[in-house]
Amino acid sequence: MSYFPSQEFILFYGFRSLAADSNFDKMTKMLQATITKCEKYAKASDITFEAVKDTYTYDGIIGVNLHFKIHGDQDSILGKVASLFHFAELNKLGFCSQSLLTE
């Protein structure tokens, strides 16, 4: 039984991943590998995912913003949130933001 049995939640989580190298193409490939992992994880976990790459480098570093959206009742989202943070830890994603909406 949920604390809020009839209420739907929408959770947004933002993470960031960085790549550093003197070769721009190599950095782009490193970020693409991270994005691919995130896409596979999100699909398997029934989570919406979007990646927004930086269009510039700063001191030989390029980054990508990784946005995850989890939708459902409290019982269904709690496991997904825990799983998402475990995935982020394993892949060394930097936590940036979180938002909560209710329906």
Image: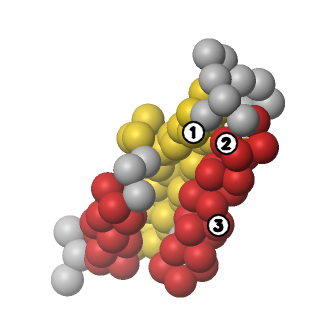
Question: Disc 3 and disc 2: Cα gap in Å?
Answer: 14 Å
Kindly identify the residue that appears in the image at 64 percent across and 50 percent down: 31
Picture disc at residue 73: none
Nearer to us: label 3 or label 1: 1
**Do the CB atoms of the residues marked 1 and 2 lie less than 8 Å apart?**
yes
| Element type at mark 2 | helix
Picture disc at residue 36: 3
Kindly identify the residue that appears in the image at 45 percent across and 67 percent down: 8
- Quadrant occupied by the N terminus: bottom left
Specify whether 68 is left or right of 32: left
**55 or 1, nearer to the observer:** 55
According to the picture, the residue beneath numbered tag 1 turns out to be 19
Question: Disc 1 and disc 2: Cα gap in Å?
Answer: 5 Å
For residue 23, above or below residue 50: above
| Total numbered labels | 3
| Element type at mark 3 | helix
Q: Residues within 10 Å of mark 3 (few under 14, many from 20)?
A: few
Specify whether 64 is left or right of 2: right
Picture disc at residue 27: 2
Query: What colouring method underlies this structural image?
Result: secondary structure
Position in image of residue 24 (x %, y %): 75, 36
- Can residue 4 be seen here? The reply is no
Q: Given the image, on which type of amino acid does mark 2 rest? A: Met
Kindly identify the residue that appears in the image at 79 percent across and 30 percent down: 55
Q: Residues within 10 Å of mark 2 (few under 14, many from 20)?
A: many
User: Residue 82: which quarter of the image?
Assistant: bottom left
As drawn, the residue found furthest toward the top would be 59
